[in-house]
Image: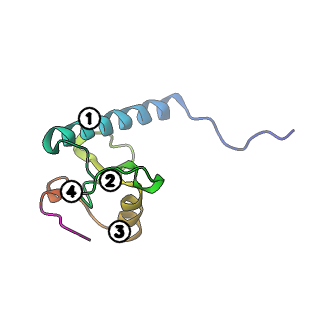
Amino acid sequence: MRKSRIKPKSDKQKMRDAEWRACGMFRRKDLMGKYGWCVCEFCRQPEGSHEFWRFDNHHIDGNRRNNVVANSFIVHRKCHSYIHDKNIQVTQEGFEGRNER
């Protein structure tokens, strides 16, 4: 039997992942407090049951090591792909004025 080529995550990476999950949860709770439910900050739609409509946590500055709430942007998985594909720059402040794509 062959060994897996996938390297296990280091303790440092596990710690970064936990920090990023905590940032996402804090941001989701903040959105729920403001709007009564958690919405995508890109398209303003609530979370749905379809796989692509689940929420992801996007790094605003693109730096995957910058795991702070101010760098967190809550988006649907589909919107997350759209942001990366079209190289769109987003901000938390820009969410208020966003109507459609």
- The amino acid pointed to by label 3 is Asn
Residue 99 is covered by the magenta coloring: yes
Mark 3 closeness class: few <14, some 14–19, many ≥20 residues within 10 Å: few
Query: Which tag, 1 or 3, sits closer to the chain's start?
Result: 1
16 lies above or below 72? above
Q: Position of residue 84 (x, y in %)?
A: 39, 64
Q: In the rendered image, which quarter is residue 87 located in?
A: bottom left
Q: Which residue is identified by label 2?
A: 75
- The amino acid pointed to by label 1 is Phe
Which color scheme did the rendering employ for the protein? rainbow
- For the N terminus, the quadrant is top right
The residue under the point 64% across, 39% down is 7
Disc number lying in front (2 or 3):
2
Query: Which mark is drawn over residue 87?
Result: 3
Instruction: Give the secondary structure at mark 1.
Output: helix
Q: Which residue is identified by label 4?
A: 91
Query: Which tag, 2 or 4, sits closer to the chain's start?
Result: 2
Disc number lying in front (4 or 1):
1
Disc number lying in front (2 or 4):
2
- The answer for how far apart the CA atoms under marks 4 and 3 are is 13 Å
Q: Position of residue 42 (x, y in %)?
A: 26, 59
Q: Which residue is identified by label 1?
A: 26
- The answer for how far apart the CA atoms under marks 1 and 3 are is 25 Å
